[in-house]
């Protein structure tokens, strides 16, 4: 297990000291995190890293789970998709299933925290157990264009919380409770982001038959239409007319996702007969992702829609120049022409890539700026600090709080 | 080296953290932006004129404020962006006066360029108003003379420098920065106080600002 002091070499000892200072102000408070799963998914990943470090800092932090059967999770999956703006058929029966399971959880989940930190919609109804303690609802989903029926159903619970937390400003809307902006983060010491020896990078490239004889453009993302892999190939093809380069499209396995398999096939069809396009169906292997990112000349994230897009933070942390769509949380990570280039079309993406390939000094500067931007704003240490400030904010209403 | 004067009152360094509070307010056009600039809490104006300094502290010089950045980036109004970016924040000692200047800059521009009212940001590129909530905490660092002051300046975080320079002057409305106030009132060194308050912190990175204050103070210590 990584210790908090190990981050000092990355962010500086004063930042670690600040975390300890803030943790001291939370003495005596019990923070109870509640979500629906301990493994799999972004929330569990974040909590599994944050909870031990919070404890190490001296904040009494717990993590509990709700229970739910297959039907319940089918309904919450539908909620999840609908909140992302996807068309879903949701009827009263679905709401009844949600409420029925929630009722059991309200009766069974032991609420003991001074601060109850509820993650995502699944446990949202637990707010019925609110008494004198403080409650926060943490939304990890892109709710910029939610299905109104589902959103209004959830609002019936949200308004009873003390505060809500969103990952991007575009996810917020007028509410009768306080709402805060806290971006997710990457862990610089995880397998996906830690420094790698050159031999490891070389061996991963060898494994996939990729030579380093020409610039490498890479997009890491699952094969999903919202990540626009076909658009990435078209942008690469436009670049290729002027700059000899190669493309890596690498993403997670899509074995249980029929749409993913179709998208993968579309990409393969589009890439046919070009040996410089490498479409890699990667198993969950963080070291390989890390190596591919580090071997790249330019990293793309040409998403059409994006929850937050932490692959951008991962690339910038490796000081790579990034070309990305200005959607979801990406504009928070990339300030156009300062820490990367934003694009809105295939042509725009191609133009930006050519700029970077033809101006390596400029590309290097953007990458360096990007790394500093991530160091200051998107590492786990900042996330920990924000959460502790969030907990403290529950006890103060002022805009300037003297602790 | 000049003899070090012991301060009448020691300087107690504080640090400051901020949390971004969402308002749910958004603007798609210059008209909407202007209306909201006039009515949002002062903490929003503070946030959007100072956020860039902290989040992009490695960039230099002249980081734009959020309003300037948005009108250029989302609306393509480069001239107005330049006008907003070049507002000399140092000339304003309250958020209210800074807000008035931003609003009048947009109003003046719209009078000359009425068609600019018709431009709108694409969905997802609207201006989202955010409020800055500050948490101020004392640190263990205390300076009793200029030598202590310089030594501590080398160690403290950017948040501490940020608090004593930016937040104290404009948000807590102390007219000048905390360092100059202390040097003048507790050490009686008006010349050094003026030299520090004469630095334009808005056109430097925080790290450059730290280096400049250390350099000026060390020069003063050496006489």
Image (tube, coloured by chain):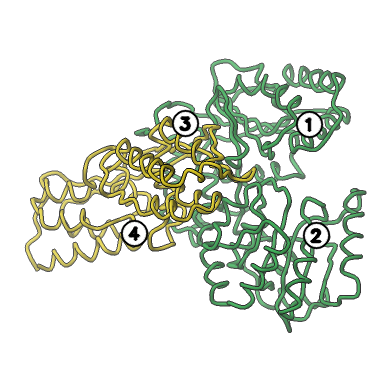
Chain colours: A green, B yellow
Task: Tell me whether marks 4 and 1 sit on the same chain.
Answer: no
Give the x, y percent position of residue A352: 64, 67
**B69 above or below B33?**
below
Q: Give the number of the disc on residue A229.
A: 2
Eye-nearest disc, 4 or 1: 4
Residue at 66% x, 73% y is: A354
Classify mark 1: helix, strand or loop: helix
Number of disc labels: 4
Q: Is residue B56 above or below residue A168?
A: below
Q: Given this view, does label 4 or label 3 mark the residue nearer the observer?
A: 4
Rendering coords of residue A276 (x, y %): 82, 76
Give me the C-alpha separation between circle 4 and circle 3: 32 Å
Horizontal relation, residue A338 to residue A206: left or right:
left
Would you say the residues marked 2 and 1 are in contact, meaning their CB atoms lie under 8 Å apart? no
Q: CA distance from mark 3 to mark 2?
A: 42 Å
* Quadrant of res B28: top right
Q: Which mark is residue B203?
A: 4
Q: Which residue is mark 1?
A: A79
Marks 3 and 2, the one that precedes in the sequence: 2
Q: Is residue A41 visible?
A: yes
Which of the two discs, 2 and 1, labels the residue nearer the N terminus?
1
Looking at the rendered structure, whether the residues under marks 3 and 2 are on a common chain is answered as: yes
Subunit under mark 3: A
Q: Looking at the rendering, which quadrant does residue A312 occupy? A: bottom right
On the image, numbered disc 3 is attached to which residue? A393
Q: In the rendered structure, are the residues bearing label 1 and label 3 in contact, judged by CB atoms less than 8 Å apart?
A: no
Tell me how far mark 4 sits from mark 1, CA to CA.
47 Å
Is residue A59 rendered to the left or right of residue A32? left
Classify 10 Å Cα crowding around label 4: few (below 14), some (14-19), many (20 and above). some
Q: Nearer the viewer, mark 1 or mark 3?
A: 1
């Amino acid at each position: 297990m990584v210790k908090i002091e190990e981050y000092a070499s990355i962010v500086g000892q004063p930042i670690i000291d600040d975390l300890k200072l803030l943790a001291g102000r939370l003495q005596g408070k019990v923070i109870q995190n509640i979500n629906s799963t301990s493994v799999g998914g972004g929330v569990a990943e974040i909590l599994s890293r944050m909870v031990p470090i919070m404890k190490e800092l001296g904040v009494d932090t717990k993590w509990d789970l709700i229970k739910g059967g297959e039907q319940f999770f089918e309904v919450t999956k539908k909620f999840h998709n609908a909140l992302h703006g996807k068309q879903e058929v949701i009827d009263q029966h679905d709401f009844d299933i949600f409420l029925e399971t929630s009722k059991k959880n309200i009766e069974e989940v032991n609420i003991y925290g001074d601060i109850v930190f509820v993650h995502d919609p699944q446990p949202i109804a637990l707010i019925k157990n609110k008494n004198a303690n403080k409650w926060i609802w943490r939304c990890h989903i892109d709710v910029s264009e939610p299905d109104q029926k589902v959103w209004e159903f959830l609002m019936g619970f949200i308004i009873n919380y003390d505060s809500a937390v969103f990952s991007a400003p575009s996810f917020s809307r007028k509410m009768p409770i306080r709402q805060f902006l806290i971006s997710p983060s990457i862990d610089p010491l995880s397998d996906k982001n830690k420094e790698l020896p050159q031999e490891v990078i070389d061996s991963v490239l060898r494994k996939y038959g990729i030579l380093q004889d020409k610039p490498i453009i890479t997009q890491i993302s699952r094969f999903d239409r919202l990540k626009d892999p076909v658009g990435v190939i078209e942008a690469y093809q436009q670049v290729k007319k002027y700059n000899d380069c190669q493309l890596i499209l690498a993403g997670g396995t899509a074995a249980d996702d029929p749409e993913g398999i179709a998208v993968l096939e579309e990409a393969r069809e589009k890439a046919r007969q070009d040996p410089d396009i490498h479409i890699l169906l990667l198993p969950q292997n963080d070291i390989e992702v890390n190596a591919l990112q580090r071997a790249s000349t330019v990293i793309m994230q040409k998403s059409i829609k994006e929850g937050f897009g932490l692959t951008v933070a991962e690339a910038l942390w490796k000081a790579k120049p990034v070309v990305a769509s200005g959607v979801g949380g990406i504009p928070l990570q990339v300030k156009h022409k300062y820490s990367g280039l934003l694009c809105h079309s295939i042509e725009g993406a191609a133009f930006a890539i050519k700029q970077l390939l033809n101006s390596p000094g400029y590309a290097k500067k953007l990458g360096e700026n990007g790394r500093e931007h991530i160091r200051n704003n998107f590492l786990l240490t900042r996330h920990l600090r924000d959460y502790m400030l969030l907990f403290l904010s529950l006890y103060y209403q002022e805009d300037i709080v003297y602790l | 080296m000049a003899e070090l004067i012991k301060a009448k009152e020691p300087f107690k360094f504080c640090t400051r953290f901020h949390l971004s509070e969402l308002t749910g307010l958004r603007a798609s056009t210059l008209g909407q932006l202007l209306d909201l600039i006039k009515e949002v809490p002062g903490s929003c104006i503070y946030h959007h004129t100072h956020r860039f300094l902290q989040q992009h502290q490695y960039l230099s010089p002249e980081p734009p404020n959020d309003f300037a950045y948005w009108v250029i980036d989302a609306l393509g109004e480069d001239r107005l962006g330049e006008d907003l970016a070049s507002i000399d924040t140092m000339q304003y000692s309250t958020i209210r006066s800074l807000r008035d200047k931003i609003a009048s800059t947009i109003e003046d521009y719209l009078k000359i360029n009425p068609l600019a009212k018709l431009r709108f940001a694409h969905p997802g590129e609207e201006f989202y108003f955010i409020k800055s909530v500050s948490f101020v905490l004392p640190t263990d660092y205390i300076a009793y003379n200029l030598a202590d002051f310089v030594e501590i300046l080398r160690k403290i975080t950017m948040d501490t420098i940020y608090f004593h320079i930016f937040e104290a002057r404009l948000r807590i409305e102390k007219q000048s920065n905390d360092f100059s106030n202390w040097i003048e009132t507790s050490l009686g060194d008006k010349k050094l106080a003026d030299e520090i308050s004469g630095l334009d912190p808005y056109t430097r990175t925080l790290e450059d600002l730290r280096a400049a204050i250390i350099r000026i103070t060390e020069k003063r210590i050496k006489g």
